[in-house]
Image (cartoon, grey):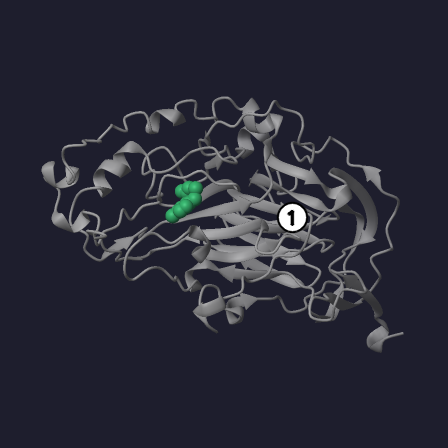
């Protein structure tokens, strides 16, 4: 027996035999071991729209945009807590093979009461958009507000309390854990710095409860087991497998100070890598307030087609490439090789005018989950037809043809300042 009569319990986050520099495990010193619960049963009342079935809708490569997702109002929907309020929007792969990812929207109005949840299938990266999350985990407590994010890894039991109507986004990865991207020539500092990630201190309660419910998402389905005490009875812990939170305001933005548009990977906060070098199951990328200084450059995102899937959400404000239509609490999905880029308004506005140093994205925070997986949307994602923005494609339709083979400086001819014209290239003799 351990000091104070505690049980010792290991939580493994990597295979016992994972190389030392990747090995993750923690030791929990607790009042009772986690095994002290009744048998698992399929959770009563179904699982809402939490799923890992990614073959239930017909494939559709269209650019997709969702209006802000509804938050259940207490009066109409009754009490909906965090677990009951999770709806899967899209995903790919299979937790049984430990390969894939899912993107969920959570929207709730009540705290989880005498209930804890854990994910047997993978890790959650949680991005609150409205309302603060008061999270109790086996490792201690975390308060996570909009503009902060947290990661709760596979197996860690947690409870979410909220103050009112609460909404956010959640990226689930089956393959591996999130980590900081390497910095290469950037050097030892920059992007998200390790010192800004906060891990909870042990917190425990010695509380007997008649029917405490433990919920586990296992192979995509929700299971419930009862026990007669709170699972938050870990008095002390040590190790390197623990949940953490991060405030996005601490992100040190790197960008060009000369010309051209850097790819958005320069804004990567965390990455979950696949087995292919440099290829992410999920990159969590943010578009923070920053200075835009690029000369002779169209500064907003370029028009592009990507071999990765791009899901975007908005925490607050707006997104420079689409000032209208993409709203906080809503989302977009630009699937593999589906063309996208700034809407017509953005193109016209940013192709003219003087390129002075300028604050970009002030008072806003958009983010992207970028994945090498080809995401399928769930029936829930398309069922809410009033949430799918059927008009989305129209934001590009006014894009005009500007080509004029007789006039090289079309912008100038149209009255734009010289500063926005592309640099004159040296002619080959
Ligand atoms: O599509 C988007 O809006 C995200 C994005 C931003 C950017 O600056 C470059 C590429 C990219 O995919
Ligand atoms: Fe993109």
| Left or right for 348, reference 22 | left
Residue 33's place in the image compared with 391, above or below, is below
Which is more toward the observer, 17 or 312?
Answer: 17
Which is more toward the observer, 214 or 285?
Answer: 285
Which is more toward the observer, 408 or 342?
Answer: 408
Q: Give the image quarter of residue 82.
A: top right
Q: Where does the N terminus fall, quadrant-wise?
A: bottom right
| Left or right for 83, reference 368 | right
| Left or right for 284, reference 341 | right
Residue at screen point 38% across, 62% down: 254
State the SS at label 1: strand
Q: Where is residue 205 in the image (x, y as percent from the top left)?
A: 72, 62
Residue at screen point 22% across, 31% down: 403
Residue denoted by label 1: 173
Q: Position of residue 223 (x, y in %)?
A: 78, 40
Q: Is mark 1 within 8 Å of ligand 1?
A: no
Residue 361's place in the image compared with 18, above or below, is above
Instruction: Specify the farthest residue to the front.
Output: 429
Instruction: Specify the farthest residue to the bottom.
Output: 3
| Left or right for 24, reference 335 | right
Q: Position of residue 360 (x, y in %)?
A: 29, 52
**Would you say residue 236 is visible in this rendering?**
yes
Which quarter holds ligand 2? top left
Q: Give the image quarter of residue 81.
A: top right
Alpha-carbon neighbours of circle 1 within 10 Å: few (<14), some, or many (≥20)? many
């Amino acid at each position: 027996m351990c000091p104070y009569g505690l049980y010792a319990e290991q939580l493994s986050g990597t295979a016992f035999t994972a190389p030392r520099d990747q090995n993750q495990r923690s030791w929990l010193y607790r009042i009772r071991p986690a095994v002290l619960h009744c048998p698992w049963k399929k959770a009563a009342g179904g699982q809402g729209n939490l799923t890992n079935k990614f073959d239930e809708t017909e494939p559709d490569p269209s650019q997709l945009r969702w209006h802000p997702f509804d938050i259940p109002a207490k009066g109409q929907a009754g009490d909906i807590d965090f677990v009951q309020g999770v709806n899967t929007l899209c995903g790919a792969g299979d937790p049984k093979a430990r390969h894939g990812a899912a993107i969920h929207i959570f929207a709730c109005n009540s705290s989880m009461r005498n209930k804890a949840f854990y994910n047997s299938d993978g890790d959650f990266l949680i991005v609150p958009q409205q309302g603060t999350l008061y999270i109790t985990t086996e490792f201690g407590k975390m308060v996570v507000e909009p503009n902060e994010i947290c990661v709760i890894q596979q197996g860690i039991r947690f409870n979410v309390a909220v103050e009112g109507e609460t909404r956010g986004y959640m990226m689930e990865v089956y393959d591996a854990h999130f980590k900081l991207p390497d910095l290469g020539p950037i050097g030892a500092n920059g992007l998200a710095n390790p010192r800004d990630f906060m891990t909870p201190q042990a917190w425990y309660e010695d509380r007997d409860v008649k029917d405490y419910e433990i919920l586990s998402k296992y192979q995509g389905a929700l299971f419930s087991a009862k026990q007669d005490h709170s699972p938050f009875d870990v008095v002390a812990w040590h190790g390197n497998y623990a949940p953490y939170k991060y405030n996005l305001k601490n992100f040190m933005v790197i960008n060009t100070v000369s010309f051209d548009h850097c790819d958005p990977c320069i804004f990567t906060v965390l990455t979950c890598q696949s087995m292919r070098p440099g290829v992410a199951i999920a990159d969590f990328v943010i578009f923070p307030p920053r200075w835009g200084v690029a000369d002779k450059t169209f500064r907003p995102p370029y028009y592009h087609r990507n071999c990765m899937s791009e899901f975007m959400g908005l925490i607050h404000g707006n997104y420079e490439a689409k000032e209208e239509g993409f709203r906080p609490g809503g989302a977009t999905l630009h699937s593999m090789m589906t063309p996208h880029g700034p809407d017509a308004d953005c193109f016209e506005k940013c192709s003219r005018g003087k390129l002075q140093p300028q604050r970009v994205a002030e008072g806003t925070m958009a983010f992207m989950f970028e994945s090498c997986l080809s995401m399928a949307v769930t029936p829930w994602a398309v069922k809410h037809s009033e949430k799918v923005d059927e008009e989305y494609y129209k934001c590009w339709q006014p894009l005009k043809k500007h080509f004029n083979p007789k006039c090289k400086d079309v912008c100038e001819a149209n009255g734009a300042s010289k500063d926005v014209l592309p640099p004159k290239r040296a002619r080959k003799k």
